[in-house]
Image (tube, rainbow, N blue to C red):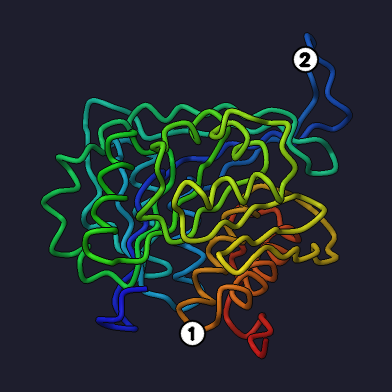
Amino acid sequence: MNSQSTYSKWWCIGAAVLDKKYRLEGNAVWGSSNPARSSHSLGGVARNVAENLCRLGVSCELLSALGTDAAAQLLRTHAQNYALGMDFCLELPTQHTAEYLAALQPSGEMVLALADMAILDELTPTVLAPLEPELRCAAGIFADCNLPRSSLEYLLHFALEHKIFLAVNTVSAAKAQKLPARLEGISVLFCNALEAGSYLGNEDLKHEALAQELLKRGTGAVVLTLGEVGVWLETLKGGRLFPALEVVVLDVTGAGDALLAGTLFGLTMGKSLEQAVQVGQQVAALTLNTLHSVRPDLRPDLLDLSL
């Protein structure tokens, strides 16, 4: 991470979204109406990561694109509850704020998700360039692959040139393909096996091979999530599996973002990457045990930081 100031802000760049969830009352039946109970919450990978970090006591600035609709106002009002900065968000009166819809099995497992993220295409390098003075002073930068390809390439080059810690999340198999062929500039890449295989163009590789191939592309490290199996960490020193923690799963939404945020929190606390991943697993487990995308009572004293 940037050594200028331990207490500088993290910048989280990417999606801020209104999440709509429909929990089915029975197993999904395709081609038919399914009884379900609906709820809504605030989401988006970058926004979720930023909220988790803020609730853990880390100062954050969120850069996203919003409309001027009710969803945007809800996002801004909610951010005030945990001191998340949104002063630099792009505001577009002619577009609506991004939406994400998820259908969940009664167990909480996802059946299908739909995402309308068109507004995020406006987060171009032209928007990022004027913010370089602030970004150069960041404790670190997190970006998700909801951003345009050109903006991801811009951030990789920027981080490499200015030696700034950059974490990136691939978001989905389709969006992983936005990443450039070379990954120099990324300090830690977060993805799952499907996303890694999609990016590499080879979904038949085992998780160890996937992580090693990503490392060959130039990223400093890979945190590969493997669902119930756990998390595979690949660095230049080799690979290691961190088995999943035992937890009662109420809802999987936001768990990956929590793992990511917890890992960044661990690094901010001076932990090694190996230790930070274990902190991230704790935050993910706490999130899996709630119906919220971000656990509302999350705080550092819920974690074992004596790793």
Question: Looking at the image, which residue is at 57% across and 26% down?
Answer: 114
Residue 150, image x and y in percent?
28, 35
Please state if 108 lies on the left or on the right of 170 as rendered: right
Question: Closer to the camera, 202 or 52?
Answer: 202
Q: In which quarter of the image is the C terminus?
A: bottom right
Q: Quadrant of the N terminus?
A: bottom left
Question: Which quarter of the picture shows residue 26?
Answer: top right
Q: Name the residue under label 2.
A: 33
Question: Which quarter of the picture shows residue 258?
Answer: bottom right
Residue at the limit of the structure toward the right, as seen here:
26
Judged from the image, the secondary structure of the residue bearing numbered disc 2 is loop
Of the residues shown, which amino acid type is indicated by label 2? Ser
Q: Mark 1 points at which residue?
A: 270
Question: Looking at the image, which residue is at 79% across and 21% down?
Answer: 34
Judged from the image, the secondary structure of the residue bearing numbered disc 1 is loop
Of the residues shown, which amino acid type is indicated by label 1? Gly
Q: Could you tell which of marks 2 and 1 lies nearer the N-terminus?
A: 2
